[in-house]
Amino acid sequence: MSLLSKNYHIITYGCQMNEHDSENIAGMLEALDYSHTPNPEEADVVVMNTCSVREHADKRFFGMLGQFKKQKKNNPDFIICVCGCMPQQPHIVEEIRKSFSWVDIVFGTQTIAEFPNLLMERIRTGKKQFSIIANNEEIPEEKESKREFKHKALVNITYGCNNFCTYCIVPYTRGREKSRSLRAVKQEIINLVKDGVKEVMLLGQNVNSFRDADGNNFAALIRSLDEVEGLERIRFMTSHPKDLSDELIACFGDCKKLCHNIHLPVQSGSDEVLRRMNRHYNRQRYMEIVEKLRATCPDLSISTDIIVGFPGETEEDFLDTLSLVREVEYDSAFTFIYSPRVGTPAAKYDDQIPEKIKHDRFDRLVEDVNRCSAKKNSEYLGRIVTVLVDGPSKNDTGAWSGRTDTFKLVNFTSEEPLTEGQMVSVRITETKTFSLDGEKVDA
Ligand code: SAH
Ligand code: SF4
Ligand code: F3S
């Protein structure tokens, strides 16, 4: 970082789509000769890549925006950019215009490619720049992005969502679903492998509905990527149960590089709640999928997303969710308290659940989920697993950390120094609720 060069800092909220968009934005800024700084106070440009999936995310964002006002006062050349899912909602843009006049550039999920032009225009004219459109028909071309890890990459395969689950804002913030071509995805991954990537995470709101203009479906994509030489691991998220095909399940048996892990959001164990969420599957169908997956791939780890306190959820509905968690025995679950989002059907339902009940159900669910995670992890005690090394462990200096094929986080010791991206064998010596401990052994 030179003193003369300009610095940027990006703050990312939300899901992996946003993380990947931030990697692309970082790539654009570096192409303009900006350097990354970990300290927002040293930045000439700050980009806030926002999420709107729950109210909590909104609140954090507006709080943060307030903090930058002071920095702007001290340095009028400081440029504040807001992008991501929040500006895709007209009432948010209105609020930014009205109450946050110190924001310089606002763009959405559909106009990311415009960012370098918006920045140049803002610098040249000193005028605020807004670029938001509801839905871009074009499939964005992937540009050079700045990856967080040398050995792992996020790769978009679809954009947008057409499912309109009644609680969810994403179809309104990410536009209509579009698939990239199998050819373009494969070529990008071949290039990434040349650049040192060993593991790819294929991204989409509903990867199972991938279908390109040549008629290739998601299973065809996985089979084709399984042939990429030098690539070691393929992961994907998120998988909507309604579109999970037998063809894809078969891939877990046949494709060597496909990791033995699936994130399969269930949202609720009650058929009535699932119906009102517009999820297009019921509990029985979900359980059939889980059973088929386990029959094909016995060591498959399964994670999920669960919402509690959806409007009209009765105690009985909630108990159905608890019993489903016990029946599936998830390896892990992201649990959420239902948060009404402006513009979604469920926000208008008149049977909203009182906060106290929502929180009580949430606590009971988390307890069960954690018990399940600890139990599943305990099965690893004494096993030797293959770990892709991510780097030094975050919580213990001197230890290393990485993930198994089944996405378990492993913190482990090693007598010799290691490098990121190495594949090593680790014996598991202790298991915890959210991670495993171990020691490196010779393969
Ligand atoms: N496309 C993915 C999910 C994307 S959003 C899928 O369909 O599985 C990630 C998770 O946030 C969802 O699975 C859901 O559990 C949660 N979520 C979405 N909207 C929510 C809301 N309004 N309140 C609480 N949780 C929500
Ligand atoms: Fe939201 Fe449903 Fe689309 Fe997932 S599938 S992004 S939960 S609308
Ligand atoms: Fe949030 Fe947008 Fe992702 S609302 S969860 S950042 S798609």
Image (cartoon, grey):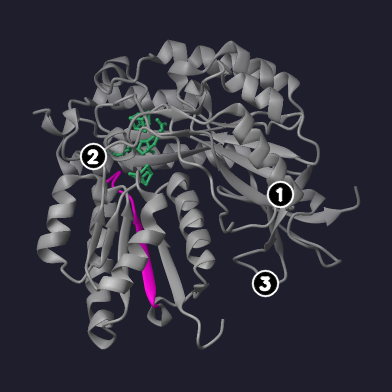
Residue type at mark 2: give it: Lys
302 displayed left or right of 205:
right
Split into quadrants, the picture shows ligand 1 in the one at top left
> Given this view, does label 1 or label 3 mark the residue nearer the observer?
1
For label 1, the crowd category at 10 Å Cα-Cα, with few meaning under 14, some 14 to 19 and many 20 or more, is: many
Answer whether residue 198 is visible to the viewer in this image: no
341 displayed left or right of 420:
left
In three-dimensional space, the C-alpha distance between marks 1 and 3, rounded to whole angstroms, equals 25 Å
What percent of the width, then of the height, locates residue 406? 66, 37
Q: Kindly tell me whether mark 3's CB lies below 8 Å from ligand 3.
A: no
| Disc 1 secondary structure class | loop
Sequence order check, earlier mark of 2 and 1: 1
Quick check: is 48 in the magenta stretch? Answer: yes
For label 3, the crowd category at 10 Å Cα-Cα, with few meaning under 14, some 14 to 19 and many 20 or more, is: few
Quick check: is 399 in the magenta stretch? Answer: no
Residue tagged by mark 1? 197
Residue tagged by mark 3? 397
User: Which dot marks residue 222?
Assistant: none
Residue tagged by mark 2? 358
Residue type at mark 3: give it: Thr
| Residue 389 occupies quadrant | bottom right
In three-dimensional space, the C-alpha distance between marks 2 and 3, rounded to whole angstroms, equals 39 Å
Identify the residue at horizontal 12%, vertical 28% (top origin): 349
For label 2, the crowd category at 10 Å Cα-Cα, with few meaning under 14, some 14 to 19 and many 20 or more, is: some
Sequence order check, earlier mark of 2 and 3: 2
In the rendered structure, which segment of residues is drawn in magenta? 44-54
Q: Which of the pair 165/303 is nearer the observer?
A: 165
